[in-house]
């Protein structure tokens, strides 16, 4: 293990942040479309335009926000709200942990400032690069900013434009995130070890989705896949 | 305990959701500061990392309609053949749209 590369500070490059901002724009476009869908749903649920926008700007997590709307009424029960938000977003904990070998080489302020922008698409990009031996925390920052802008702008548009978009499902647009995440997984390392982890993760996730409380399947599947790694070690440690 | 959906209550609800979500974003790095990084931990993390994606996508195929399954299948096939993400995603969306127009 080379001590220099493991311990030297990570230098964030602003030009790389810009490149990653631009690179994720095609995906951000679809995120914006789903922001429109969220804005629409939020207003129909009874949130005011600025409240829906405030939620997108501060929560910045689509699935949890839609689930939050599902709890809406004259009042919202606090414990279920927190439990569901935590369950749906607990994948962020794993994603942050996966980037830790790079993150720990940033000063704490930058490390946690960067993680505020963490979401599925920019993490998938950054982690795929890491697997390929390239350190790219800039993807979290630049990509995250583009995705956040798209999500907030989409919500604003949805809140104001209403139902003029038609039916995004008819065009398959609801599948963009699923297809993107699948493509990112397949684009990474596909060793026998990882394929076994995926088989275990997929099976556990489906079983959890079928029989465990709602929204627990992602964390159950991911941890089950991780167990494979715990017992079947990688051939060589992650060196660059 | 419940929060009323008055204007102030809604802001409070949003703050609660935002705070819980922020904790999940920062939580991984916070926890890892206390876990020694050795080969076994790295191996666990690397197997777990892409398993997150699989654990999102596979139940999606089970829960979704025929269009959703067609989309994921098309993405899988194009990704395995070309290894390029954007054509694979485009093929997935096209497959979902086509299946939903037909059935």
Image (tube, rainbow, N blue to C red):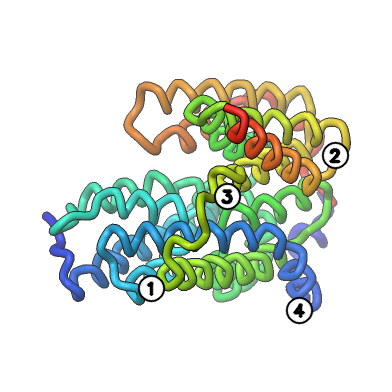
Alpha carbon separation for disc pair 3 and 2: 23 Å
The percent coordinates of residue A190 (x first, y second) are: 78, 31
Residue A106 position, x and y percent, is 65, 69
Whether residue A25 is visible, yes or no, is yes
Q: Nearer the viewer, mark 4 or mark 1?
A: 1
Which residue in the protein does label 4 denote? A14
Same chain for mark 4 and mark 1? The answer is yes
Q: Which chain's residue wears label 2?
A: B
Please tell me whether residue A12 is drawn above or below residue B17 in the rendered image. below
Q: Residue at x 60, y 65 (%)?
A: A147
Q: Which chain letter matches label 3?
A: A
Residue with the mark numbered 3? A95
Q: Quadrant of residue A225?
A: top right
Write the residue at 73% across / 35% down. Answer: B75
The residue under the point 31% across, 59% down is A44
Which is closer to the viewer, label 1 or label 3? Answer: 1
- Write down the residue under mark 2: B83
Same chain for mark 1 and mark 3? The answer is yes
SS under mark 3: helix
Q: Chain of mark 4?
A: A
Q: Secondary structure at mark 1?
A: helix
Query: Do residues under tags 1 and 2 come within 8 Å of each other at their CB atoms?
Result: no
Residue A162 falls left or right of residue A76: right
Give the x, y percent position of residue A87: 38, 44
How busy is the neighbourhood of tag 3: few (under 14 within 10 Å), some, or many (20 plus)?
Answer: many
Q: Which one is in front in this view, the residue at disc 3 or the one at disc 2? A: 2
> What residue does disc 1 label?
A54
Q: Nearer the viewer, mark 4 or mark 2?
A: 2
Q: Is residue A47 left or right of residue A111?
A: left
Q: Which of the numbered marks, if any, corresponds to residue B65?
A: none
The reply to whether label 3 and label 2 mark residues of one chain is no
Asked whether residue A116 appears in the rendered view, the answer is no
């Amino acid at each position: 293990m080379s001590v220099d590369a493991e311990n030297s500070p990570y230098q964030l490059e602003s030009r790389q942040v810009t490149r990653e901002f631009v690179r994720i724009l095609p995906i951000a476009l679809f995120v914006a479309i789903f922001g429109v869908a969220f804005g629409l749903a939020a207003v129909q649920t009874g949130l005011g335009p600025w409240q829906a926008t405030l939620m997108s700007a501060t929560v910045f997590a689509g699935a949890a926000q839609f689930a939050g709307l599902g709890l809406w009424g004259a009042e919202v029960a606090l414990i279920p709200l927190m439990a569901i938000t935590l369950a749906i977003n607990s994948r962020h904990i794993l994603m942050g942990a996966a980037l830790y070998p790079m993150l720990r080489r940033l000063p704490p302020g930058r490390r946690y400032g960067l993680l505020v922008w963490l979401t599925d698409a920019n993490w998938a990009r950054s982690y795929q690069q890491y697997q390929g031996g390239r350190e790219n925390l800039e993807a979290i920052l630049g990509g995250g900013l583009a995705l956040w802008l798209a999500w907030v702008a989409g919500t604003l548009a949805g809140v104001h434009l209403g139902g003029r978009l038609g039916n995004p499902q008819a065009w398959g647009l609801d599948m963009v995130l699923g297809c993107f995440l699948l493509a990112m997984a397949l684009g990474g390392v596909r060793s026998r070890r990882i394929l076994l982890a995926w088989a275990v993760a997929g099976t556990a996730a489906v079983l959890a989705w079928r029989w465990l409380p709602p929204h627990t399947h992602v964390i159950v599947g991911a941890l089950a896949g991780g167990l494979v790694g715990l017992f079947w070690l990688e051939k060589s440690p992650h060196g660059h | 305990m419940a929060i009323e959906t008055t204007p102030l209550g809604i802001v409070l609800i949003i703050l609660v959701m935002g705070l819980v979500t922020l904790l999940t974003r920062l939580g991984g790095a916070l926890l890892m500061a206390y876990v020694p990084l050795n080969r076994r931990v790295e191996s666990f993390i690397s197997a777990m990392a892409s398993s997150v994606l699989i654990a999102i996508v596979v139940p999606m195929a089970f829960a979704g309609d025929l269009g959703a399954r067609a989309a994921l299948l098309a993405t899988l096939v194009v990704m395995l053949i070309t290894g390029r993400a954007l054509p694979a995603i485009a093929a997935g969306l096209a497959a979902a749209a086509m299946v939903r127009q037909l059935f």
